[in-house]
Image (cartoon, rainbow, N blue to C red):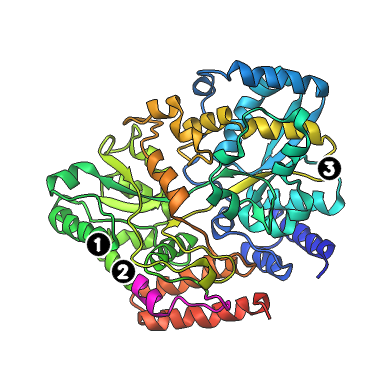
Amino acid sequence: MQDGDRKRLVAEAAEAFAARRIGKRAFLRRLGLAGIGLSGFAATMLGGNRPFSTRPSMQALAQGGPPTELTRWLRDVGSRHKGTTIRYVSEATPPTLVAKALAREEFTAHTGIEVDIEIVPLEQVLQKVTADTQARSGAYDLYYIDQSWTSLFAGDTLDPRALYDRKRDLALPDFDWNDFSPSLLRGISTYKDSLVGIPFDIPIFILMYRKDLFEKHRLKVPTTMAEYMTAVRTLDEAERGNGIRGTTGQLKAGHYSLNCDWTMWLWAHGGSVFDKDGFFSGGDEEGMRGLAYMLDLVKHMPPEATGWTWDGEAQSLREGKAAMAMSWGEIFPGLDGKESKVAGLMEAARPPAEAKLRSPDAAGFQEIPHIGHQGGSSICLSKHSRNPDAAWIFMQWVCSKEVAVRSALHGSGGAAVRASTYKDPRVLAAAKAGPGTTRHFPATEWTIDNALGSEPKLPAWVEISNHIIPGELGKLLAGQGTPEQCMAAIKGRADRLAAPFRKG
């Protein structure tokens, strides 16, 4: 299928879904026919909102304005484009919300460049970006791009690192490309050997635990799979009578959140979703070990966990119903929130080391096995932009060290994409118990750099991760069939869907 035909199909499907003329599953099937998928995390956001996100406070954002160096640069380069209007389309990610809150007072005020940030549901982002690139209209200058869209839009975006080197007169001093984690640049924003954009958002799994209960029972923070299980069992046995279970989960049948938990334990035991030849491998020896580990953990969770997504899991932690969990770092600030029953009691730590780890070369479809399950995205500059210089100035500003710090502090606890953010004095000062805490940032930084896990990248992955895997696992958790039968059922369906995308 030619690129233009693919984009036409995607645009029509996205428009039909946004208008509710077709359902979610029909929309995803049409994307598959066009050879494009969504990451499972992104697909779950269709028709809804990002979990854990809150609107940033302008009063909080105004504290400690931009440094004079950044202001001078904005005035210098921006004055050449005063009166220009640029447009950016995105879903409601934490850094996009912060950018929208800051743009007028801290970008437009110094450059004279107006910024129209259009925040719409994810399916509308896809529809608008696809229509814009198909027509090459330049209606938008900047795009939000989910990591799974990179192959479709790689030819429609400018490589920001090459642009930085080529347009030295517009280059932000000390932008510092080495400040971005190589794992994010590679895993989220790279297609073949070129950058399609700059990492902008990175939800990722970390370890969260009740420090008071660990001290009470003289437990050390687990650093291995065996130690993690021991801690869960010990706490469950000791605290169940107090209404506290050893751990919790997001194990709702048929929901992508169940796939997230399963892939984490699969990867942590040396497995992968697909083998190097593109066949489902969750039922191999390592995969069965990972599944058995997850099923053992379920015995020490609140029974309701099999009906929870990440929202229910987060609530169970806030209500003190579980002693520890491996889950999205964005949950952590809420554990210190005003409504939390465990405020000040929770701690964040690195994930325990995998018992065994499979190389990405031995997995399929660009899968990266690691315990730190992630779901990131990029901000990209359109090759069809009518105002590429003005848009490039904004893109550097919104991805600058200063704005990155503000996004991290006021973006609902989302992990930062820059190394310098984690060392900034304002971020370090916020590392205390209370609303807006950054106490979890050392754990997220380490996980991004050392244990970032990425799902397979193929169009069929949406159907596999949002329906097939959590559907069959849901049956198993409900007592229907054996683990072997569950994995065999997934394999039969997953292999058929993956077949068109295998090499050879």
Instruction: Provide the residue designation for mark 1.
Output: 229
**Residue 455, position in %: x, y?**
53, 62
Specify the quadrant of the image occupied by residue 11: bottom right
Specify the quadrant of the image occupied by residue 486: bottom left
Q: Secondary structure at mark 2?
A: helix
Label 2, residues with CA under 10 Å away: few <14, some 14-19, many ≥20 = some
Instruction: Say whether marks 3 and 1 touch (CB < 8 Å).
Output: no
Q: Nearer the viewer, residue 198 or 141?
A: 198
In the depicted structure, whether residue 310 falls above or below residue 74: below
Residue occupying the point 73% across, 38% down: 165
**Residue 496, position in %: x, y?**
60, 81
Q: Is residue 20 visible?
A: no
Q: Is residue 4 left or right of residue 224?
A: right
Mark with earlier residue (3, 1): 3
Instruction: Provide the residue designation for mark 3.
Output: 138
The quarter of the picture where the C terminus appears is bottom right
Let me know if residue 288 is in the magenta part.
yes
Q: Nearer the viewer, residue 415 or 461?
A: 415
Amino acid type, residue under disc 3 in the picture: Gly
Q: Secondary structure at mark 1?
A: helix
Instruction: Provide the residue designation for mark 2.
Output: 293
The residues bearing labels 3 and 2 have C-alpha atoms spaced at a distance of 50 Å
Instruction: Say whether marks 1 and 2 touch (CB < 8 Å).
Output: yes
Residue occupying the point 39% across, 40% down: 442
Amino acid type, residue under disc 1 in the picture: Met
The residues bearing labels 1 and 2 have C-alpha atoms spaced at a distance of 8 Å
Residue occupying the point 60% across, 35% down: 176
Amino acid type, residue under disc 2 in the picture: Tyr
